[in-house]
Amino acid sequence: MYGWIGEILPAEAAGSVSTRALEVRSRHAPLCILCRGGRRLCGKAVCPIELKARALISNSGAVMRTELSGSSPPSVFVGRYGYPKVSIGPMVPPVYGDTSVMDVPESWLFESIPSIVNYRYSLVRGTARVEVDAARRGGRLVDSLQELSMGAAPADAEVTFAKPPAGRISIDDNSQPFGPSAPLKQFSISAVKVDHRIEKAFYDGDCLASEALYDLYNSGVEVSKLQRAFSMGVFGVQKNRRLVPTRWSITAVDSILSQRLIDEVKSYETIDKYQVYFWKHQHNTFAAILLPRAWSFEWMEAWFPGTFWNQEGISAAVEGDYEGYGGRKTYPGIGGCYFSCRLGVAEHLKSIRRQAAALVVREIMPEFPLPLGVWFVRENVRAMFRKPHNEFDDLPSALRHLGGLLRVPLGKWISKSTILRDSFLQRRMDEYFKAGGL
């Protein structure tokens, strides 16, 4: 086996894939070799390397061939390396039928992590390099991928690769599961059933992308489908259309939709009590406190020792980002999950037709095996707001309840949170003026 993967996998699995088919990258290779997936020295419930490798090996029949046919969910991929000349291509599994679940994160929340990883590793990527402005210039491959990106149902596809696809198992910060890939030689699709709502926006070359996205979102098109089409340059003024790397398109759509919702939320009355929400799932804890104030938003994460962002720490590492009523001017350091969470918050506030300041926190336990993508944040935040909540008349009472739900000491959250620090300052000022100050 390539590198040290043979030391990690069970013998029957390690012998089933050629040395060219797998590449493993990890900053903790010595620990992984010592553990070999069985002793759980990293503290995780399952070995992330074994989890990814088993999924890749289960699809090794596709990995070893230069020809592939199957039903794309539908799914496309646009890379970001080399921008503005990027890699694009279809994502196709080696099976026919209803494969839609393989690329619909909205349906994954209650799936097991091995199932989700298997979905991702079942999709084989063909890649070809094009300029991003090919979205408006067209071409055989771009036209086919744009049609596929607008698909409402799985579409049959045939792919020929220049060489057998190779799979990479990357165990690094923010590493997300992606299946094997190879340079694309030929690609054809048939029986594409496009979503006519998206197709209508595609042919409207005068409509701004933000307007098209929000109209489609309000008509019931799933966020993940909008992100897929957005990546292929389907929306916007014709002369400005371009391909958008998949990773960027996910964040862009979350950002655009949440900002449009926030603009509406700002016209509503504020809530009249402090509200606390709570949700636990897959070794992650999500909690939120909504305050009866004008809109502001803060997203904070606590990574416990042994997690991907805090491998060597001795205590939970807490980080976050904030925006006031006027919004953000810079990209949040905490990453695209900020906008995924913001979308879930804005959706909830619009649904209750109220405005609030919102602090959402997440605690990630070391048992959580690997990052799955920002969809995990969005769908968990949505689930949290569907649950019953507790209401309180004052901030101290709400915080005492919140503190009882979390493992990180409440004082640490308060010291890091802009919203909570500002709230305590405002409370002290209100008390001062009520007492006759100035």
Image: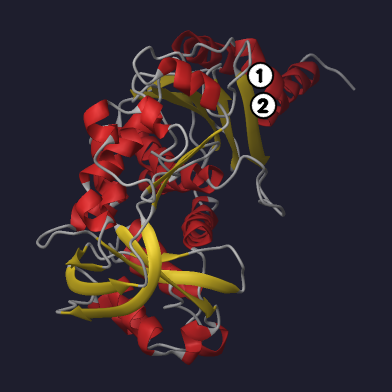
In the rendering, at what x and y percent does residue 94 appear? Answer: 18, 59
Q: Which residue corresponds to mark 1?
A: 414
In this rendering, position of residue 364 left or right of residue 412: left
Camera-side residue: 23 or 264?
Answer: 23
Q: Residue at x 49, y 41 (%)?
A: 175
Q: What amino acid is at disc 1? A: Ile
Q: Residue at x 42, y 16 (%)?
A: 35
In this rendering, position of residue 196 left or right of residue 163: left
Disc 2, SS: loop
**Based on the displayed image, in which of its 4 quarters is residue 422 positioned?**
top right
Give above or below for 331 relative to 16.
Answer: below
Q: CA distance from mark 2 to mark 1?
A: 5 Å
Camera-side residue: 91 or 223?
Answer: 91
Which residue extends farthest left?
97
Asked if disc 2 and disc 1 are in contact, CB closer than 8 Å, the reply is yes
| Label 2 neighbour load within 10 Å: few <14, some 14-19, many 20+ | many
Camera-side residue: 77 or 12?
Answer: 12
| Label 1 neighbour load within 10 Å: few <14, some 14-19, many 20+ | some
The numbered disc on residue 417 is 2
- The answer to whether one can see residue 109 in this image is no
Give above or below for 232 relative to 172.
Answer: below
Q: What amino acid is at disc 2? A: Ser
Camera-side residue: 187 or 13?
Answer: 13
In this rendering, position of residue 390 left or right of residue 123: right
